[in-house]
Image (cartoon, rainbow, N blue to C red):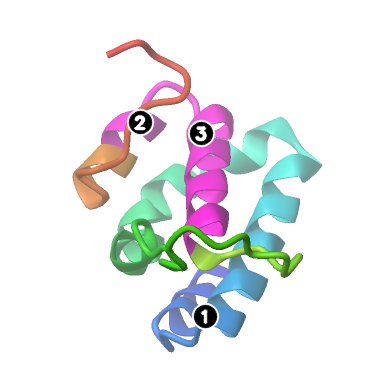
Amino acid sequence: MLILPMRDALNTRNPDIIIATLTALQQLLRVGPSIGIALVPYYRQLLPMLNLFKQRRVNIGDRIDFRGGRRIGDVVNATLELLEQCGGPDAYLNIKYMVPTYESCVYNR
């Protein structure tokens, strides 16, 4: 029931909506250990849009950014790491298939 609305929210390509959706997904993953494993089969529906935003950074040169808000690239990376940590042994392979530039935070590969 949650996968289709989350997928639709991620497909909007609106950074504010994507950050809100990923924050909700992070909270969902922290609720219980079995939720991460249950979401692994749905990675192929949720992760394609994250591949686009994983490397998104704001280039401000040598200035300091004092805005306290989280950037979409940071939220995507934190979500991918949490998905890997909570998703069990098959999570890394599924994430790597959908986001080829992802590096494991659990395994030294």
Looking at the rendered image, the disc whose residue lies closer to the viewer, 1 or 2, is: 1
Where does label 1 land, which residue? 15
Horizontal side of 54 relative to 93 (left or right) equals: right
Where does label 3 land, which residue? 87
Is any atom of residue 1 visible in this view? no
- Say which element carries label 3: loop
At horizontal 40% and vertical 33% (from top left) the residue drawn is 91
Residues at marks 3 and 1, CA–CA distance in whole angstroms: 25 Å
Q: Is residue 69 above or below residue 73?
A: below
Of callouts 3 and 1, the N-terminal one: 1
Highlighted magenta segment, given as a residue range: 73-94
Residue 75 belongs to the span the image colors magenta: yes
- Percent across and percent down for residue 27 are 75, 53
Is any atom of residue 22 visible in this view? yes
Give me the disc on residue 92: 2
Residues tagged 2 and 3 counted as in contact (Cβ below 8 A) = yes
Residues at marks 1 and 2, CA–CA distance in whole angstroms: 25 Å
Q: What amino acid is labelled 3 in the image?
A: Gly
Who is closer to the viewer here, 20 or 45?
20
